[in-house]
Amino acid sequence: MVDLEADSAITDVGEGRYTATLSPDWNVWGPVGGYVASVALRAAGAATTLRRPASLSCQFLHAAQFDQVELVVEPLRASRRAEALRVTMTQAGKTVLHATVWAAAESLDGPSLPLAAAPQAPPPEELPTMEERMAEWGQTSLPHLFHSDTRPVSWLERVSDQFGEPNQRGWMRLRKGRVFDDDPWLDAARSVLYSDIVAFPSVMLASPDGLPPYVAPTMELQVIFHDTAPESEWLLVDGHASALKHGLASGRAAIWAQDGRLLATGAQQMLCRMFG
């Protein structure tokens, strides 16, 4: 059973260097990009004294293997209010990932206004599970959702030539109902994971039948953190497709707490790879 906390754990080996072991339990076309990015985010959190992640910009440079990786965290700019860090992940002499992370102090002066409203959604307890929905089509599961209990807000009643709106919306929680109220960096990793997994399905929902088969691994993932809600077991994940053109696919995501607060927004660029 996947365990985000254990599987993204890092070991401090001194002087801004860390190691981690990527778990094969997170396999979809190789290691899930949001999972790998979560490892980098936790390394940045370990290297700073500031408590809150503010942003993550992550480039995936080589496909990682399910083995040990090395991480180096370098400070780029630091003050009492904010710090920028560069994270480099390598494996067997290759750079797997490069990320820039901003951290912020917990209590910064400034206005606080709710500028965005959460989309309408029934409570997760009132919605069928993804497994129940997939059973309607004679299928068992979707591989990219193995790590979470998922309750789709809307569903396709039948497969048509044109799927429809480029949007995927649903409640998600980690298996076993895991929350992380004592580690804001690990809690933010939930938003990183969910920001990564909704863009490609949203693109597929908008695609007409008959397109040549392809996959689209992540090239770049950006996540902006707005608020924290470690007590929110369920997160409302709202994904939208942005474009499918020139061999690239892109999308965006918004992550909401159960009380309607916006926790994070994400953007993703993917590289299409054709089958055959």
Image (cartoon, helix red, strand yellow):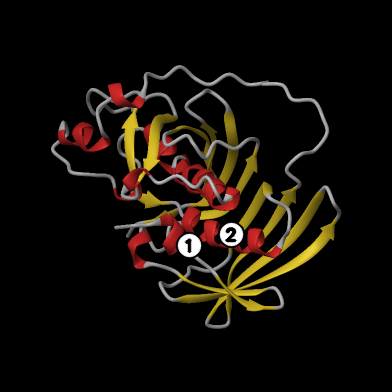
* 6 sits left or right of 267 in the view: left
Q: Does the rendering let one see residue 222?
A: yes
**Which quarter of the figure has residue 10?**
bottom right
Quarter of the figure with the N terminus: bottom left
Decide if residue 163 is on the left or right side of residue 240.
left
> Given the image, on which type of amino acid does mark 1 rest?
Ser
Quarter of the image for residue 170 reads top left
- Estimate the x, y position of residue 106 in percent, counting from the top left: 73, 43
Q: Position of residue 232 (x, y in %)?
A: 47, 34
Is any atom of residue 212 visible in this view?
no
The amino acid marked with disc number 2 is Arg
Q: Quadrant of the C terminus?
A: bottom left
Give the alpha-carbon distance from disc 1 to disc 2, as whole Å. 8 Å
In the image, residue 102 above or below residue 90: above
Q: At numbered mark 1, what does the secondary structure look like: helix, strand or loop?
A: loop
Residue at 51% over, 54% down: 218
Furthest residue toward bottom: 93
Res. 158 image quadrant = top left
Residue at the image position 33 percent from the left and 47 percent from the top:
175
The residue that disc 1 covers is 8
- Residue 237 appears left or right of 71: left
Of 257 and 241, the residue lying toward us: 257
Q: Which mark is residue 191?
A: none
Residue ID for mark 2? 42
Q: Please report the residue visible at 19 percent of the width from the left and 33 percent of the height from the top.
A: 132
- Judging depth in this view, the residue of 25 and 215 nearest the camera is 25
Tag 2 or tag 1, which sits nearer the N-term?
1
Tag 2 secondary structure: helix
CB atoms at circles 1 and 2 under 8 Å apart? Answer: yes
User: What is the x, y in percent for residue 257?
Assistant: 51, 30
Question: What residue is at 73 percent from the left and 58 percent from the top?
Answer: 49
